[in-house]
Image (spheres, rainbow, N blue to C red):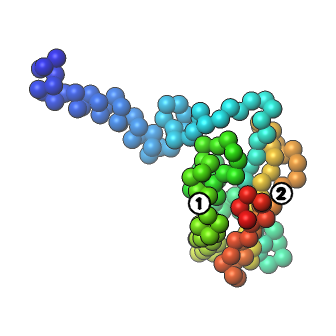
Amino acid sequence: MKRLFKANIYKWLVFFLILAPNIFTSIVGIESFPYTSAPMFGHYVGDDTELYLLKFEAVSGNELIDLEPYYGRPAAYFVRYFFSKVYGSPGSISAFNGRLSESPPKFQRRMNTFFLDFATYIREQHGIQLQKIYLKSIRVDKNRNPLAEAIVLGYYDTNTNQYTALDEAHK
């Protein structure tokens, strides 16, 4: 055992057994146990658990546009980033609860910054000028099929650079 530590082989052993797989999965983006940043043990999800998707739609001219094709990355990554880093969770049982909702002004700044950057990206990369971006929530089944009409949580006005929350948790 002393020979192992003297030869510094343990450093390479740790690297190849633990660090290398984690670095690989971080670069490739694998989201499965044990290589994931998702809070898989955050709360129980059973057959009766209500499931929701976040959806972004925008008004451009007189047209309502689904923004999913303009995310610039897979929808799951984009929405996960938005939910965990920008929006936060209003739910009392959530792995994200309490991390972001410090105060209404901080929430407002985060939302304004996110939507300004998102609208700018769509204008510069896709040549689409947006007037409003709607943040919607839609209840779905386990196969992501809609079970109800989408509910507007809020909207961002590109003329005023202001996000207006319509949900009670973020007013």
- Residue drawn at (57%, 39%) of the image: 39
Residue 131 pos. (x, y %): 74, 77
- Name the N-terminal-most of marks 2 and 1: 1
Question: Residue under circle 2?
Answer: 151
Depth order, front residue of 85/63: 85
Question: In this picture, is 99 found above or below 110?
Answer: above
141 vs 65: above or below: above
Question: Which quadrant is the N terminus positioned in?
Answer: top left
Q: Can the viewer see residue 73?
A: no
Position in image of residue 135 (x %, y %): 74, 62
Q: Do the residues labelled 2 and 1 touch (CB within 8 Å)?
A: no
Helix, strand, or loop for circle 2?
Answer: strand
Kindly identify the residue that appears in the image at 69 percent across and 82 percent down.
160
Using the rendered view, name the quadrant where residue 38 is placed.
top right
Residue 71 visible in the displayed image: yes
Residue located 74% across and 49% down the image: 53
Q: Identify the mark at residue 102; answer none if there is no mark.
A: 1
Q: In this view, does 90 lie to the left or right of 147?
A: left
- Kind of residue sitting beneath label 1: Glu
- Residue 8 appears left or right of 75: left
Amino acid type of the residue tagged 2 in the rendering = Ile
Residue at 75% x, 73% y is 132
